Image (cartoon, rainbow, N blue to C red):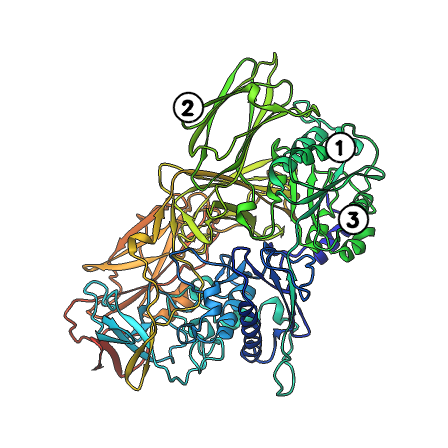
Amino acid sequence: MFSLKVILLLALHLLPEVKTSMVKLNNNGYEGIVIAVNPSVPEDEELIQNIKEMVTEASTYLFYATKRRVYFRNVSILIPMTWKSKSKYLMPKQESYEQADVIVADPHPTYSSDPYTLQYGQCGDKGQYIHFTPSFLLTNNSSIYGPRGRVFAHEWAHLRWGVFDEYNVDQPFYFSRKNTIEATRCSTHITGMNVVFNECKGGSCITRPCRRDSKTGLYEAKCTFIPDKSQTARDSIMFMQSLDSVVEFCTAKTHNREAPNLQNKMCNHRSTWDVISESPDFQNAIPLKGTNPPPHPTFSLLKSQQRVVCLVLDKSGSMSTEDDLGLSRLIRMNQAAEMYLIQIIEKGSMVGMVTFEDYATIQTNLIKITDDRAYLNITSKLPQVASGGTSICSGLKEGFQAITKSNQSTSGSEIILLTDGQDNGISSCFEEVKRSGAIIHTIALGPSAAKELEILSNMTGGHHFYVYKDINGLIDAFSRISSRSGDIAQQSLQLESKAFNITRNKWVNGTVVVDSTIGNDTFFVVTWTRRKPEIILQDPKGKIYETSDFKEDKLNIHSARLRIPGIAETGRWTYSLHNKHINSQLLTLTVTTRAKSPTTLPIIATAHMSQNTAHYPSPMIVYARVSQGFLPVLGISVTAIIEAEDGNQVTLELWDNGVGADTVKNDGIYSRYFTDYHGNGRYSLKIHAQARKNTARVSLRQQNKALYIPGYVENGKIIMNPPRPEIKEDAEKVELEDFSRLSLGESFIVSGAPPKGNHTPVFPPSKITDLQAKFQGDHIQLSWTASGNVLDKGKADHYIIRISKCFLDLQDDFHNALLVNTSGLIPKEAGSAEHFEFKPESLKIENGTGVYIAIQTISKANLTSEVSNIAHVTKFIPPWQSSAPALCTNISALSLTVFGFTVILFLF
């Protein structure tokens, strides 16, 4: 169990957020921002200069937008190794492309240069990174997006404060509570024209007024809102920062609560400024006095160096502990370390090794990995005997020595620390670790591993993993610690990691898919607990590899590997393993590979939890991102395996359906709530992503981006911007072949959980966020996705549906709105499509009448969900006939925009 001292240390050092950003807010100034340039971007001094100008402009803009609260004080720009060295470039410390706040990289070849933020958490959660393309930074796009500094401020609000866009390209118009058709925007004081473009040449277009859709009453699909160039509205930055007048975020006073945008959906109709004001940044950010602008940011140019890694491995007596099938922790560690050195670490890296018990020993100083001889020089020094106590600080200090003795700096170097033991003196070297500038990755092996390991990782920007019962866990953890440079072609990818408990003289068969994006440097590795099995492997063209082709190491660590020459054949590989031992034994199969070529973008899968720490009954969310380059991969199966500290495992199917824990449908982020706590302590996370039966596809759409403005209205005329690159509808989703990826997420810590098996229901059903409604004759048809009984799992007990003609009745007083009879509505399994039809007999429905609908879900334990999104439907019978709809506002005239003209309907 975690002691009080350790919990206090964790509270100080291990922040709940997962992304290890170095950004800190100190006396109103942001420090430690990292902007990293991808290795594939050509060297260009103008690019660096434009980045500086963008950040400087954004700093001042953000300072006034936040009412003199925050600005950018210092920024590091990380230059890739592919650029020439210059005297002005400094050496990075813990800055890396992998954990940069802003990345500069080319997009997909057919995709536009829209700036965007990878953001898929809940309201107020930080995003992952901002992505700018070189084209955006080198081309004057101010008429399309506004000045680059304003765009950066828009994206920073996504990244740092967890607010969302206030436009909606999929639902650009909606019926307001006044029964007018409005453009989805904030604030409604922003004016413009609604038109359809018939033909465009150069900067001019032939337009016509928008027509009404005969079914919905809203404008037709091609209708576009064109803003006036000259505005008086001061908000909002999250809608259209390009307008000169827009210098603020929407506040509670100006916020458009009705607009069907992601900000309202995710933040329960709260304004962006309300959410920003409650962020941790603003708790102590008192507005600066006076009228002076903020000081300009300072910039440091850092150039990435060759990778330097030192393994610091525990060989204390507890490492001789054997698992249930007789394999010691020491052998498992050696299997994983050997695989890391041979298959994972990139060629050209510098690698050393230290072992420790009561004291530490440098086994090898840094050796440059160039060929098999270099690997063998290190693997031959892997420890063969476990003995002694555990002195983690001794291991770390000798790791630093191994680096400096090889004329390398500890600053920016990486240490992989693996231990299964406790060390009461570990905190004594925290300050030395901080001063070193090294990045510490930690692997905790078993429930007794030092509880302070995560502090070491967090304070240095490293990864942290936990392994216990999972026999392949150590191999998976080492596989996850790959290049941090941004060069995807260098990164090792894990295709398979399976364990089989096979009885005497039995066979096990299986397949592994090698897709066309990968195949270079492909290894098949088999491990065993008693005796090497018979192995048969067949490639897609029928070539067979046998047991003798799998080479054993000379260290007696029960493993053998086959390296496929050249590029592995694309398709389905078949394997068979035969246990020839007289007893049952555990066999494992691991497959790793790399991108087929430097110009081929492989499919990548990564995983993490919504927080590093959780106190029961706070639910956590499992996230898996599957992508090719920067583009999301859709239509696949993603499974998460979560293991508690005692070895208990929970399996979850992750969804990309836009409901429950999932923010946006079809964005390549697969997620699910995790509530099945099994005691306190460390938990591990592993995900397996598979595409089967040709269901996978790449989407060319990105979310959370600066709005592309097609043009402006000036003096009554529409002045067009250059048209954006068109993506044909059938090209928005490119089909992919079948593939498989496996990835380990970082460990997380749970506290306050009840004893195992003693869980009183505390989690209500999740909120329904995709409720839709339409009129069918005199009836209203509803559709939504079933939320579940416990958040997004199981079947709920029943639904409560209420309706009103007034939006605010449901938003502010749901329990007193009109109740719909749902006696025949039985909830389905979570994630299922729900449909319900009813006649709103308690309301007088006429042509033009608008009805608002919302739902609550009740669990079997009588716990109630939040109120759903509020769906709106209007009774519309074309052609429009004047009738007086019952409204919740007391007005004498109603303005309706029809066919581009304004008609005043007087109500009597």
Q: CA distance from mark 3 to mark 2?
A: 49 Å
Quarter of the image that includes the N terminus? top right
549 relative to 230 in the view: left or right? right
Which circle, 3 or 2, is nearer the viewer? 2
Between disc 3 and disc 2, whose residue precedes? Answer: 3
Image point (52%, 72%), residue name: 153
Check disc 1 and report its element: helix, strand or loop: loop
According to the image, label 3 marks what residue? Answer: 400
Foreground residue among 839 and 332? 332
Above or below — where is 144 with respect to 396?
below
At mark 3, the secondary structure is: helix
Q: Is residue 680 visible?
A: no
* Nearer to me, 573 or 789: 573
Residue underneath mark 2: 542
- The kind of residue on which mark 2 rests is Gly
- Mark 3 vs mark 1, CA separation in Å: 18 Å
- Estimate the x, y position of residue 195 in percent, counting from the top left: 25, 74
Q: Are marks 3 and 2 in contact (CB under 8 Å)?
A: no
Which residue type does callout 3 highlight? Phe
Q: Residues within 10 Å of mark 3 (few under 14, many from 20)?
A: many
Q: Residues within 10 Å of mark 2 (few under 14, many from 20)?
A: few
Q: Please, is residue 172 above or below residue 907 in the view? A: above
